[in-house]
Amino acid sequence: MTTKFIGVREFRQSLSTLYKKAQKNDTRYIILNKNTPVFEVRPLNNKDATLEQLLATSTEARADAKAGRVYKLENIEKELGIT
C-alpha cells in the first residue's frame, strides 16, 4: 500500500477522484491540516469489508491505545523525515 500526504483543501476538492485512485492503486491518504495529520483514508479490501472484521479491528486498536501501544506524532514525523 502506498501512502500519500495531502492537505484538507485538496482532499475536499478532489474526494471523488481520490477515492477512485485509492481503490485502483491501493493508496492510503494521510490528511493534513496545517502540516498536522488529522485523519487517514484508506480503501477497504474484501478481507476488511465485513462489519465483524471492522469491529474486531477497532476493538483491537482501542485495546492497544488503552495499553499505551501507540505511536507519538513526533516519532512518526521523525521516522518519515518530516521534522
Image: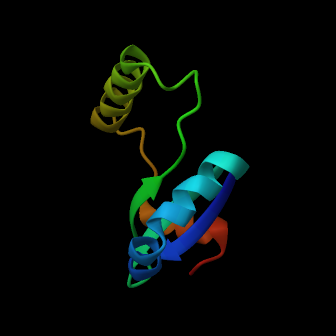
Q: Where is residue 76 in the image (x, y as percent from the top left)?
A: 54, 62
Decide: is 58 above or below 34: above
- Camera sees residue 1: no
Give the quarter of the figure containing the C terminus.
bottom right
Q: Position of residue 2 (x, y in %)?
A: 70, 55
Decide: is 69 above or below 11: above
In the figure, is residue 40 to the left or right of 38?
right
- Camera sees residue 82: yes
Decide: is 14 above or below 64: below
- Towards the viewer: 14 or 33: 14
- Towards the viewer: 10 or 70: 10
In the figure, is residue 27 to the left or right of 14?
right
Query: For the view shown, which residue lies furthest in the bottom direction?
Result: 34
Q: Position of residue 47 (x, y in %)?
A: 57, 21
Q: Which residue is drawn at 62% across and 66% down?
A: 4
Q: Residue at x 65, y 68 (%)?
A: 80
Q: Where is residue 66 in the image (x, y as percent from the top left)?
A: 27, 34
